[in-house]
Amino acid sequence: MSTTESITPDVVDAAPSPQPPPRRRSDSGLQALAMRLHFYAGVFVAPFILIAAVTGALYAISPTLEQIVAHDLLKVEAGDTRRPLSEQVDAAVATRPELALVAVAPAQEADDTTRVIFDDPSLSDERRAVFVDPYTARPVGESVIYGSSGALPTRTWIDRLHRDLHLGDTGRLYSELAASWLWIIGLAGLVLWVRRVRSRRARNSAGWLLAADRSRPGRLRNMNWHGAIGIWVLPLLLLLSVTGMTWSAYAGANIADLRTQLSWTTPSVSTALPGAESPAPAPAGDHHGGHTAETRPADPTTQIASLDRVYDAAREAGVTQAVEITVPADADQAFLVKERRMPGTYTVDAVAVDGASGSITAQLDYADWPLMAKMTNWGIQFHMGLMFGLLNQLLLLAAMIGLIVVIVLGYRMWWQRRPVRGGSRFVPGRAPRRGALRKSSWLVAVPLLAAALVVGWFAPLVGLSLLAFLVIDVVVGLFRKTADVEDAPVA
């Protein structure tokens, strides 16, 4: 008789096979909450994130596209000796004598053109630039430019497509909704993926989160790729989400207020010349409507003649990267020389220079910026694809392609989860089980509710959409409860 045969049924029943320990209530509640939030936000917000990802992929490589499209404006054949900066500006002013000169961006690289920038009343928030060959002092063309990086029309068009779909303030709501929800969906997905991978006992190496289990078929295979790719792109998505929110309408305003309260704002250089009189406040009851100190308008010819002196003084002071020189309209103001946002430029040093003497009246080194102001600037540089040139752009492009794949796989999993009824009739996939919040420990539920209130106040579009998800969830629950009652057999 074998050993197995000698064991009675009672003994076998008394010695069940070992089972894994049950999950704690807080663990299962957190996972259920993360699953339900990830599902609803994924279904309803993912279309906006998908649009942001597609336009963001184009935005990521827009600096390189700009260099290709506008090559004739941006580049010239390098020569031996550059003409004086004042001579280059004179040539540009001669082509646009009706416009006011406001700034000059001298050529930095050997084959760059010099930008002479004018205030054009026919434009809204753009400026007009005349591009000059620095070796011949001859204009090669002109274009509208936009923003601190001097984006040309191609990059500006892509920028606005990504930001508001060319729909103005209404269109900005789409990008704010996408940026505000991206980090929430990503972190909820991280919770789900970590718990799913931890359940695979064979996965015990340091890289188990980054690998997809390709042995599983169908929906599980898509889920594994969805999670693994999501982990790969998550750090970049979190950074893009935060920096994207700084440009948004409502959350961006709250971020700006927070930065002001914490003294994280970007510092600036004073351009007031020593001894210059500030406008005096009007005395109360003045029947002339008040008297203020009048500013002395600057002589354009004198300002242009001072440019070489100003530029040399700034470079001697250590401002050696590509710069934009702001030309003051008043004689009592100094020239502002500030480094531009350019690929591979990590600092924004700035000096104020007296045009008459060439002396430095104020200086602000990037090293003296507050840490959070530096980090904000670096984040914006990275978001724009300008932090470290082409590599930055390719990294963003890869992240956007990864995000697109994750979203497509997510919708495919939802499709595969649907109950098949009546042949080919489409029935949406069911949401995860209800009651997650009720089943959660108060140690989990209370902080999550508090966090939801804070996030909803700070990012209003998140709060409003979260309320919409709650309403939809309640309506769906009531509908299914009614359907279950109607389908119940009669006793």
Image (tube, rainbow, N blue to C red):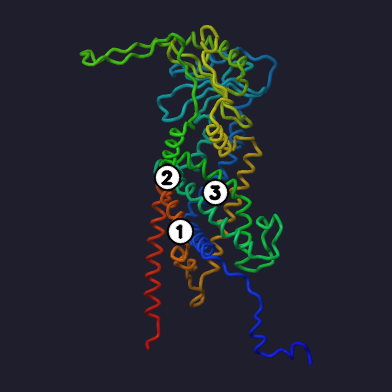
Q: Residue at x 46, y 10 (%)?
A: 274
Residue 312: where, in percent of width, then height?
A: 60, 13
Q: Are marks 3 and 1 in contact (CB under 8 Å)?
A: no
Residue 338 quadrant: top right
Residue 334: where, in percent of width, then height?
A: 48, 14
Residue 286: where, in percent of width, then height?
A: 22, 13
Q: Name, please, the residue furthest toward the right.
A: 1
Residue 62, compared with residue 34, is above or below; it is above
Please give the residue where the numbered disc 2 appears in the rendered image. Answer: 458
Please give the residue where the numbered disc 3 appears in the rendered image. Answer: 53
Q: Name, please, the residue furthest toward the top.
A: 357
Residue 131 visible at all: no
Q: Residue at x 43, y 55 (%)?
A: 449
Please give the residue where the numbered disc 1 appears in the rendered image. Answer: 445
Q: Amino acid at mark 3?
A: Ala
Which type of secondary structure does the marked residue at label 2 adopt?
helix
Q: Residue at x 47, y 46 (%)?
A: 175
